[in-house]
Amino acid sequence: MENTIIFGKNAVIEALESGKREFNKILISNNARSDIKIEQIKKLAQNRGIVYQFVAKEKLNAIEPEGRHQGVIAQIAPVDYIDLDDFIENNKGKNTSVVILDGVEDSHNVGAIIRSCVCAGVNGIILPSRRGVLINSTVEKTSAGATNRIDIIRTNSLVSAVQKLKENDYWVIASDHHAEENYYDIDYTDMNFVLIMGAEHAGISKSLLKMADFKIKIPMLTNFNSLNVSNATAIILFEAVKQKVSKKL
Amino acid sequence: MENTIIFGKNAVIEALESGKREFNKILISNNARSDIKIEQIKKLAQNRGIVYQFVAKEKLNAIEPEGRHQGVIAQIAPVDYIDLDDFIENNKGKNTSVVILDGVEDSHNVGAIIRSCVCAGVNGIILPSRRGVLINSTVEKTSAGATNRIDIIRTNSLVSAVQKLKENDYWVIASDHHAEENYYDIDYTDMNFVLIMGAEHAGISKSLLKMADFKIKIPMLTNFNSLNVSNATAIILFEAVKQKVSKKL
């Protein structure tokens, strides 16, 4: 099996609990033996018959040199990307939401966005195969394991993906700071939608922007350059959450 | 002069434009000579009589080994922290907002939060001197230079700081996922407020939580662990922005 590594306590716990990832083995630092989350990892691993091993902290540092491993590293199968057709089929008949990251390049941003998507009940993330980052160890760590709780789709053509979503009754919302409409002027509660967020510097590519049914901006109180893309995504998604929660009451 | 380094094109441009930072010198990679933002940096530096030098990219890599410098590094005076009393005095008579980070440990999060604060028109940030991170190079980079657009206060006692703010007519809002009230049930438009955000794992310390006039949570659509602290901060602050923008219309 091809291996990837994930590290950090939450990332490993989520991957174990999801049952979606095949584990090769888990390495735990000798110094972390008595930690409560490490205990949880050991129990989850035992229940699934997964091997874990205590090793010197230096061995973990050699694998993850930036020291963000928190005493635990797992060798596991890479994320399973799923097919857009399957995703659309599996989510028929309910209000479904999808986020497209059009070339976002910072792994911390992609990880934080996936985490917010899961908290906001978003059903899928679409990433382009050839621009921006795909799912790597930093994304998995920053997502706190959220990569295991959402469908992740990668595609060679975002334009074709958006076209297919439109044909299947999704409304296309593009975040664009030139837009006139504010993000909170849309009713998100009763539709399938796909939210497109652009790259940190370049924004959304023109061909995608043309396909949007709604272009929205986040109004600001100063003229500072712009929000971080993961914060902008969270602001928009949680407006949708708020509307959905308020409607239920 | 004691020096700190900042890196990344936006961070350097913002520091130059703010006029608030004393520069020692700016190092520019030979490979970045023709970049449009580098041109802007050269012009701003010339106008202020600041020395810049072209150097081999390897020299920049030696100073900032993670390769996030984008071809430019500046040696400058550290951020000027300001005194809480001065801050309160300078902001008397207008609706003022402050964010307290109670032990946030990740420099990327602190930088992204400061950037969101500036976009949201927040007037000040308070950081504890002895827990969490203060302003370092990664914070300055991640903030895209927003550290130069907001008052930054550091304090030995967050409890005393909050006490002083309360005495000066600030309402204290604490983000706490056990809270009953939702963040959007508060009217932020006509008060001074201080928003307290807790550390990534530990949350807000008990002594501060007790001082809160409002405890608020962000409702979610799934039971996933929690939001990244910078995303949570952005969601709350932009609810306040939305209320302020809507009221003006």
Image (cartoon, coloured by chain):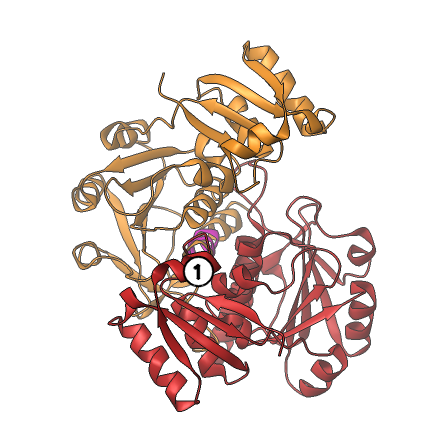
Chain colours: A red, B orange
The amino acid on which the numbered mark 1 sits, given as a three-letter code, is Asn
* Place of residue B135 in the rendered image (x, y in percent of width and height, measured from the top left): 38, 37
- Is A177 rendered above or below residue B78? below
For image coordinates 57% across by 22% down, the residue present is B27
- Which quadrant of the figure contains the N terminus of chain B? top left
Asked whether residue B235 is drawn in magenta, I would say: yes
For image coordinates 52% across by 39% down, the residue present is B65
* Place of residue A184 in the rendered image (x, y in percent of width and height, measured from the top left): 58, 59
Task: Tell me the quarter of the picture where residue A7 sits.
Answer: bottom left
What span is in magenta? B232-239
- Is A36 rendered above or below residue B133? below
The residue at which mark 1 appears reads as B228
- Is B168 rendered above or below residue B3? below
The answer to which of B162 and A150 lies nearer the viewer is: A150
Q: Main secondary structure of the magenta part?
A: helix
**Chain of the residue under the numbered disc 1 shown in the image:** B
In the current view of this chain or complex, which residue is farthest to the top? Answer: B49
For image coordinates 78% across by 68% down, the residue present is A162
Q: Residue B225, can we see it?
A: no
* Place of residue B235 in the rendered image (x, y in percent of width and height, measured from the top left): 47, 57
* Place of residue B41 in the rendered image (x, y in percent of width and height, measured from the top left): 62, 22
Task: Tell me the quarter of the picture where residue A91 sits.
Answer: bottom right
